[in-house]
Amino acid sequence: MALFLLLDRLSVLVVVIIFAILFVSPSFSSTDIRILKAERRIDLTSSIVRAFHTLQVENIGDSHASEILLAFPPDQAKHMADLQASTSQGKKKKKNYIHLDVNPIDSSQTPNGAKLFSVSLNHNPLKTGETKTLELLVILTHVLEPFPAEISQSESQLVHYRDSAILLSPYPVKEQMTYIKTPSKKVESYSMVNPTNRVGEELRYGSYADSAPYSYTPIIVHFENNHPFAVIEELVRVIEISHWGNIQVKEQYRLLHGGARHKGVFSRLDYQSRQSSSGVSSFKTLLAKLPPRVHSVYYRDDIGNISSSHLRLDSKKSELQIEPRYPLLGGWKTSFVIGYSLPLESSLFEMSDGRHCLKFNFGSPFLETVVDKLTIKVVLPEGSKEPTASVSFPVEQHHETSFSYLDIVGRPTVVLKKENVVPENNTPFQVYYSFSPFFMFVEPLMLVSVFLLFFITVIAYLHTDLSIRKAA
């Protein structure tokens, strides 16, 4: 009897497992969607990897699809700085691109640990039998692995890039191609997955037909990349607003060359005389795109002011080219500070509801750099109320209080933090707050009152007789 009860319980457990597989798995691999054609173009010409995906998606199910799932290997998901999705409407010159929201979803049960993202079709679902083309931009950082990890001053920098020749997707893919662009023709080796072709600076994998969901074919490309691996380990930007007509900006940098580490002795003579072959992966200048109409620009490090900088100004842009005290080779670091001022009217605007709005760029002003940790502090005038920040991508934000000269209750400060920041994040953000003009006169009135009290005290002291006399 006990044996029959045990068998009965086992049969119930098997049924439960089958139902779980049937009803849970489709969320990660749906047969109602298939990709008719997938094309990937991966750009490896700099230290930041950019992959452009074009997916032609078809709904072959019986109901409308409101989202499309994307899958990425765990290593790529870990180093993903940005993921953008869009779809187009119209043809040729009248084509309009519509931005689509992308959000990560729980994918702990996916094959090979793939990380899933959901692309919302923004209230325009994919109808039964309909096709739609998705355009994706995937930005990856710290995925180019120097190999060898250490090089001498006379050697070029070689790196590894790891990926899959076949698109990792939760849907079946009918036809696909992958193009990989390298900085030059100097490719040491690459994985062969027939058909594979190499023409000049481009590798082509495919075309491949009828790939099953979650197919993955690992490949490694070993190539030369002497592009400067400029990594800003930490950037702290402080924006201080004064309603007396000025905005002060101070930026503190910790800069690292993130490429292959330098080994041996550094020869400045060879570096200066043989620039085409000595330290080719190093960098000694950086170009920053500052806001227009900047003034009072300074550039210094722990020792003091650095004169090796060039500032170019016009009505539409400001470019600051800086040169550290020494060239940066692989693994070398430096720290410096950049500061400047802006007219108040260039970045601060008054809203129709009476609030003020600061508009400023979020990311690093330096071109083709990765910021591992970025902190922005917007210091508002004392007396500001209800500060809020609006950023077009997820960031960590909180409020704190800063103190300066003559402050009584402190200045409200909006703090924004983000990790793994790339040039594509250098987009405007807004900070809104309310401010009464009365608070502009608090500090001047304090100074006047202090000086007035001081003069009254002096006058009273001079007119007071403190001498000791005998009583009459």
Image (tube, rainbow, N blue to C red):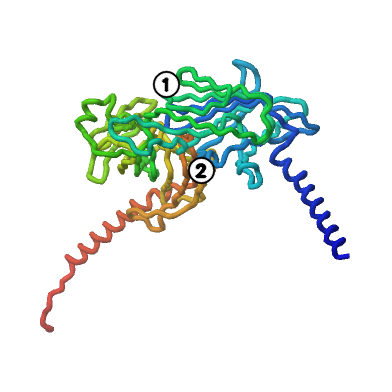
* Residue density around tag 1, few if under 14, some if 14–19, many if 20 or more, within 10 Å: some
Q: Which residue is mark 1?
A: 185
Q: Position of residue 122 (x, y in %)?
A: 67, 34
Report the residue at 31% width, 29% height from top. Answer: 280
Residue 268 in sight from this viewpoint:
yes
Q: Nearer the viewer, mark 1 or mark 2?
A: 1
Report the residue at 19% width, 31% height from top. Answer: 269
* Residue density around tag 2, few if under 14, some if 14–19, many if 20 or more, within 10 Å: some
Residue 345 in sight from this viewpoint:
no
Is 241 rendered above or below residue 210? below
| Three-letter code, disc 2 | Arg
Sequence-wise, the earlier of marks 1 and 2 is: 1
Given residues 450 and 266, the one toward you in this image is: 266
Query: Please, what secondary structure does the residue beneath circle 1 have?
Result: loop
Q: Position of residue 83 (x, y in %)?
A: 55, 35
Is 381 rendered above or below residue 348? below
Q: Position of residue 114 (x, y in %)?
A: 61, 41
| Three-letter code, disc 1 | Lys
Given residues 137 and 235, the one toward you in this image is: 137
Which numbered tag is attached to residue 355?
2
Q: Give the image quarter of residue 63.
A: top right
Report the residue at 75% width, 46% height from top. Answer: 21
Is 330 rendered above or below residue 444? above
Q: Give the image quarter of residue 103.
A: top right
